[in-house]
Image: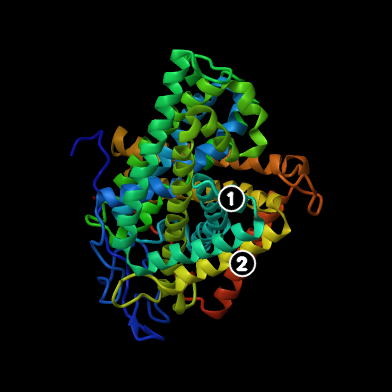
Amino acid sequence: MAADTPPETTPRTATATAAPVVPGGTTVVAAPTGTAGPRGSGTPTAQIPAGGLKPDAIGFLDALAIGLNATSPAYSLAAVIGPVVALVGVHAPGVMLASFVPMLLIASAFHFLNRADPDCGTTFSWVTRALGPTTGWLGGWAIAMTGVLVVGSLADVAVGFGLLAVGADGLAANALVREVLTVLLILLMSWLCVRGTEVSARFQNVLVLLQVLCLVVFAGVAVYRVYAGTGSLDAVRPAAGWLNPFGAGGSALTGGLLLGVFAYWGWESAVNLTEETKDSANAPGRAGIWSTVVLLATYLAVAFAVVAYAGTAYLAGRADTEEAVFAALAREVLGGWDWILLLAVATSALASTQTTIIPASRTALSMARRRALPDAFAHIDARRGTPTTSTWWVTGTAVVWYVVLHRISENALADSLTALSLLIAFYYALTGIACAVWYRRRLMRGPGPFLLLGAGPLLGSALLIWLLVESVADMADPGNASSSTAWFGLGAPLVIALFLAGAGVVLMLLRRAASGVFWRERPGVAPEAP
């Protein structure tokens, strides 16, 4: 092995020493009472018995499509492009490029950790093995809560833009109609998740092709009209200097990076399906990395096209409308064909509604197998090989969260989405740290291991921790929240994030009191030899 290449890691299957039966007669994987999960070096004790997740259900391209759709490229761009331009002007493409750096570094950490431990719990399992059960539990809780926070908002956007795409503007403006259709859509997407991973993958393949095609058409027409001089807004020709993220100054860059990280979030859904993917030790991690690369190309192309066609004043003036800016741009750029871009956003949010359920449900399943959650969460459909209880738990909690906040106000729903960035930065940063800690004995074996297993993940984590601190400072000011109303003297997004963190700690302590098996696990380290 070359000294400057990262060492191969030894893939392992999910640890299990017994297969208890839960109500319904389905065999699931879990450690028996009184037995901890992986200890020390994390060497597995047994193979997954019958009744686990369905192996080899999808391939690399399916995982790639799921990783892309989980990020919801069209919706993410629609949500962040206005605010980013308001902060950094024409340097919005540069900010999207800079935001890619920590994502790539963390995606690399996911890849190498998955090679050692292809567990559907991803961050939960890896952080537990490297840093201990308490930290691992909190990382798993953060992943589960991201699904709860965002699923309702994604489904709401899918319904709204879908109605606009077919000309049903009146229904799109009716809050009750949107709420009912949103709940039905969440239930439908959850049913597809339970129906089978192959069914979900085929559905996602169609949606990602449709979404990308619509974005390419929109970006191509916008750039053509800029150079042809037929644009209807304050067009400006693209320049290479737009790729400089520092052009607008440090404070503006910080705010832009916070939004950029949100735009890239979600690609790790491909890795959550590792136990259901062919070549589980390698394909899911590669799919995660390639997802970030494809997203970078998509974001840069569309960001250049949007800024060039609309100009900074138009976009900055609509920064508060979030994804609605794409509804306005669709008419400006495409005229009567505006439904193309509306359809792109609708399919983007629709696809992400389903794929965002995946990491939350698989993480809950993994936690239950290790007795970090009650055994019922590890229930797997015997015929389809998909998690049932954990999926419907995520669905039910997300529906309640959406309905309650939607009834409070649209701003409250937006504030809950803003709180999401804190959870994202937290568990991504934990993953990067876990990678360096787990592989610490290999870091001095050459430049490759040092950079890819240690320095890179730690740098990505440091950037995310910095953004996390900046986010907390920003969210503490009620004036920066969508509602602009103080909750306990703080901004609503920060209060929501603190509430979820506190709830997680309380539930963890209750679970530890009920069953301390999981907390007897001890952190380990990867062996020096691959």
- Seen in the picture, residue 101 relative to 385 is either above or below; the reply is above
Q: Measured from the top left, where is residue 245 in percent x and y?
A: 53, 23
> In whole angstroms, how far apart are the C-alphas of marks 1 and 2?
17 Å
- Seen in the picture, residue 64 relative to 256 is either above or below; the reply is below
State which mark lies toward you, 1 or 2.
2
Is 64 situated left or right of 227 in this image? Answer: left
> Would you name the residue on which mark 1 appears?
420
Look at 47% across and 14% down and name the residue there.
239
| Residue closest to the eye, 9 or 235 | 235
Q: Measured from the top left, where is residue 446 in percent x and y?
A: 29, 35
Element type at mark 2: helix
The disc, 1 or 2, on the residue closer to the chain's N-terminal end is 2
Question: Does the rendering let one see residue 434?
Answer: yes
Q: Measured from the top left, where is residue 263 in percent x and y?
A: 50, 40
| Residue closest to the eye, 138 or 398 | 398
The kind of residue tagged 2 is: Val
Residue 466 location, quadrant: top right
Q: Measured from the top left, where is residue 41 in percent x and y?
A: 33, 60
| Residue closest to the eye, 316 or 210 | 210
Is 522 situated left or right of 153 in this image? Answer: left
Look at 25% across and 70% down and name the residue there.
47
Element type at mark 1: helix
> Would you name the residue on which mark 2 appears?
400
The kind of residue tagged 1 is: Leu
- Seen in the picture, residue 396 relative to 78 is either above or below; the reply is below
Is 60 situated left or right of 89 in this image? Answer: left
Color encoding of the figure: rainbow
| Residue closest to the eye, 414 or 185 | 185
